[in-house]
Image (spheres, rainbow, N blue to C red):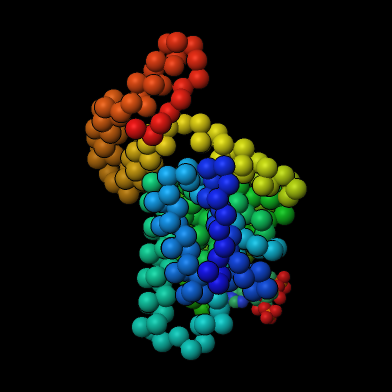
């Protein structure tokens, strides 16, 4: 692949945005290659957790602005659809996903991070949706995901001013799970991924789909989905293993079945 590279290591499927000289600006090629990388990891049983990060000093500075000059309305619509399709796919992939944010996460870069389940950032990372300064607004799902993550007041402030915020502020408003010193970013991300890998991958994927369903559904529908799923979980080996391990005072050994 030209714009993305990948590495599998101890259950983690790493995805690196790899246009460091352009601060990992997301062009059409990168959208396609990211989708391929995520789909490959989805099918790969050795991969339990997917981590997305950037090569160089940025996570990503957003969609590639150099492609905007010649963009027709139909082309812009296509770019927004493809970008959105990627973010929606990442959000729904049935494995935990972590954005390891090593610098700027702006525009489409922040939208990519928001599509992941978890966001861990280095303390010098910067966040923002500056699209308004280009005379546009976020088009890869950011208007909706930021709203849901931090609420209307902060979401509108970030989108309407285009101002950047620090990692500390991003953590305070609920955009991040963790802020860590730069030199510990990888270590802390791996630790977090390992915690997830101790759980049943099957139950994690069912839990993820119940939570995502509830995010977009009326409360009663979400609660019904929870109860139905909860009943279903009792048909799995991992539920039996979890309960037996507790009763036998040992660590569970989940098989994802
Ligand atoms: C991120 C900024 C603030 C970094 O500034 P600085 O450190 O001064 O680095 P630059 O010299 O500006 O950038 C280095 C290099 O990368 C190119 N680049 C940076 N961002 C983009 C981008 N989004 N698209 C295309 N290219 C980009 C920059 O042109 C330089 O290339 P050279 O060939 O060396 O000139 C700063 O870069 C910045 O503000 N970037 C834009 C952030 C932004 O507006 N993002 C929103 C994009 S629209 C979008 O995402 C739509 C989807 O909702």
Residue sitting at 37 percent across and 77 percent down? 77
Residue 207 appears anywhere in the view = no
- State whether residue 135 is above or below residue 60: below
Q: Is residue 229 left or right of residue 58?
A: left
Q: Position of residue 33 (x, y in %)?
A: 47, 67
- Viewer-closest of 48 and 66: 48
Instruction: Give ligand 1's quarter of the image.
Output: bottom right
The answer to whether residue 114 is above or below residue 257 is: below
Q: Nearer the viewer, residue 148 or 84?
A: 84
Residue positioned 30% across, 28% down in the render: 236
Residue closer to the observer: 66 or 13: 13
- The percent coordinates of residue 243 (x first, y second) are 39, 17
Residue 207, percent across and down? Answer: 37, 37
Q: Residue furthest bottom?
A: 70
All told, the count of numbered labels is: 0
Camera-side residue of 180 and 44: 44
| Residue that appears at 41% across and 31% down | 255
Which quarter of the picture shows residue 39?
A: bottom left
Q: Residue at x 61, y 67 (%)?
A: 18
Confirm whether residue 121 shows in the render: yes
Q: Determine the residue located farthest toward the top in the rendered image.
A: 248
204, above or below 156, in the image: above
Considering the image in quadrants, where does the C terminus appear?
top left
Q: Quadrant of residue 45?
A: top left
Image coords of residue 84 (percent x, y) = 40, 65
Is 121 on the left-hand or right-hand side of 73? right
């Amino acid at each position: 692949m030209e714009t993305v590279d990948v590495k599998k290591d101890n259950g983690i499927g790493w995805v690196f945005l790899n246009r460091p000289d352009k601060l990992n600006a997301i062009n059409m090629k990168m959208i396609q290659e990211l989708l391929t990388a995520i789909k490959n990891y989805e099918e790969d049983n050795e991969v339990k957790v997917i981590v997305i990060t950037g090569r160089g000093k940025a996570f990503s500075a957003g969609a590639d602005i150099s492609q905007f000059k010649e963009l027709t309305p139909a082309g812009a619509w296509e770019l927004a659809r493809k970008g959105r399709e990627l973010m929606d796919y990442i959000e729904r992939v049935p494995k935990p996903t972590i954005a390891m944010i090593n610098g700027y996460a702006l525009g489409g870069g922040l939208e990519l991070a928001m599509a992941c389940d978890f966001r861990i950032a280095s303390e010098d990372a910067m966040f923002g949706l500056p699209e308004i300064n280009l005379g546009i607004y976020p088009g890869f799902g950011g208007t909706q995901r930021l709203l849901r993550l931090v609420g209307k007041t902060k979401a509108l402030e970030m989108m309407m001013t285009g101002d950047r915020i620090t990692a500390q502020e991003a953590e305070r408003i609920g955009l991040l799970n963790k802020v860590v010193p730069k030199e510990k970013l990888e270590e802390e991300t791996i630790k977090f991924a390992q915690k997830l890998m101790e759980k049943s991958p099957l139950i994690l994927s069912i839990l993820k789909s119940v939570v995502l369903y509830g995010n977009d559904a009326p409360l009663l529908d979400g609660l019904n989905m929870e109860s139905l799923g909860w009943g279903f979980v009792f048909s799995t080996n991992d539920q039996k293993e979890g309960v037996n391990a507790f009763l036998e005072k040992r660590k569970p050994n989940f098989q994802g079945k």
